[in-house]
Amino acid sequence: MSGGTLWTVVLVASVGCYLLKLAGLSVPAAWVEQPWVTRVVEFVPAALLAALVAVQAATSGSALVLDGRLVGLAVAALALALRAPFIVVLVLAGAAGALVHVLTG
């Protein structure tokens, strides 16, 4: 990608982001204060993060891969369900993933 094309993409993306922000600010308050809108908006960040984690844990490039990352994710989910401290969740997930990697080569 040449320098001119790169800057064109950056400028177009910047204008697009600004227009999207302006559109969000232009929505009437009555629409945003609806209870169902509030519930949906509260779950969007968690859903996006879950989707990113799932893609990173179960894919490599365009292929589906089941390896230690998925085991680490499962161990982390279990530790979180048991209300373990976050540092413990990280250590357990890392150790489980590493152990699967060592055992499977």
Image (tube, helix red, strand yellow):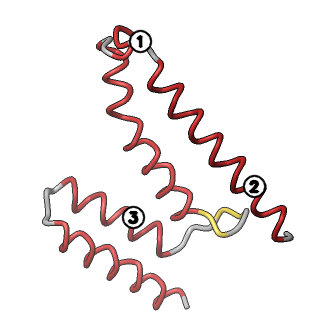
- Is 48 in front, or is 90? 48
Mark 3 / mark 1, whichever is N-terminal: 1
Q: Position of residue 85 (x, y in %)?
A: 13, 66
Q: Which image quarter: residue 66?
A: bottom right
Q: Tag 2, which secondary structure?
A: helix
Q: Position of residue 19 (x, y in %)?
A: 59, 33
Q: Position of residue 55 (x, y in %)?
A: 56, 57
Q: In front of the other: label 2 or label 3? A: 2
**Mark 3 is on which residue type?**
Leu
Mark 1 / mark 2, whichever is N-terminal: 2
Q: Tag 3, which secondary structure?
A: helix
Q: Which mark is residue 9?
A: 2
Vertical placement of residue 55 versus 68, above or below: above
Q: Which residue lies at the image location 66% right of the left edge and 62% below the top edge?
A: 64
**Mark 1 is on which residue type?**
Pro
19 relative position to 2: left or right: left
**What residue is disc 3 on?**
73
**What residue is disc 1 on?**
28
| Residue neighbourhood size for the residue with mark 2, other residues' Cα within 10 Å, grouped as few (<14), some (14–19), many (≥20) | few
| Residue neighbourhood size for the residue with mark 3, other residues' Cα within 10 Å, grouped as few (<14), some (14–19), many (≥20) | many
**Mark 2 is on which residue type?**
Val
